[in-house]
Amino acid sequence: MPDTKAGREEQARTADRRRVERDVSEALARGDEPEPPDDTPTECYRRGCTEPAAFSVTERYQEETGKGAVEASALLCEPHTGEEAPTNLDQAYSGYVFLVEPIDAATGE
């Protein structure tokens, strides 16, 4: 194939098509694999605490540069959840969230 713009574009399309075909065949081959185990932590996030996590605490606030939102989440035991409070109120905006949700003991979520 001559080294022309059309030739290079055709080679690129062929390479892209082969890559997509390879990705699809690899995904189909992995279809029979079992799902990976759920490795959600079951202990409190606080250092040195081995109590089981009972709550998920999430805070979403505006990034300091103002370019986007930041979301921080942690799984905490009951005593440490009681100590939590909003810490980024100075970056609060209309989408600000401070949310404490119980973790379902049966599913770990």
Image (cartoon, helix red, strand yellow):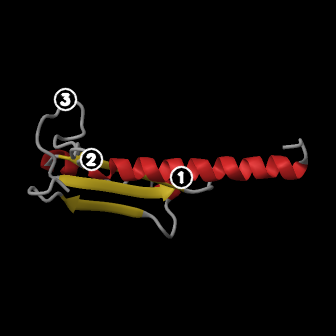
Badge 2 marks a residue whose secondary structure is: loop
Residue 19 placement (x, y as % from top left):
58, 47
Name the residue located 21 percent from the left edge and 50 percent from the top edge. Answer: 81
The Cα atoms of the two marked residues, 3 and 1, are separated by: 49 Å
Give the residue at the far top of this rendering: 48
User: Looking at the picture, which amino acid does disc 3 mark?
Assistant: Gly
First of labels 3, 2 by sequence position? 2
Type of amino acid under label 1: Glu
Q: Is residue 64 left or right of residue 104?
A: right
Specify the farthest residue to the front: 1
Label 1 environment density (alpha carbons within 10 Å; few <14, some 14–19, many ≥20): few
Q: Which residue is mark 2?
A: 33
Using the rendered view, name the quadrant where residue 99 is placed.
bottom left
Q: Please name the residue that numbered disc 1 is placed on.
A: 21
Q: Secondary structure at mark 3?
A: loop
Label 2 packing within 10 angstroms: few (<14), some (14-19), many (20+): few
Q: Position of residue 39 (x, y in %)?
A: 23, 42
Q: How many marks?
A: 3
Badge nearest the viewer, 2 or 1: 1
**Residue drawn 65% across and 50% down?**
16
Q: Residues within 10 Å of mark 3 (few under 14, many from 20)?
A: few
With respect to residue 48, does 12 lie above or below?
below
Distance of label 2 from label 1 (alpha carbons): 20 Å
Q: Which of 7/107 is in front? A: 7
Residue pictured at 34% horizontal, 47% vertical: 30
Q: Nearer the viewer, mark 3 or mark 1?
A: 1
Secondary structure at numbered mark 1:
helix
Q: Amino acid at mark 2?
A: Glu
Looking at the rendered image, the quarter that the N terminus falls into is top right
Mark found first going from the N terminus, 3 or 1: 1
Report the residue marked by disc 3: 48
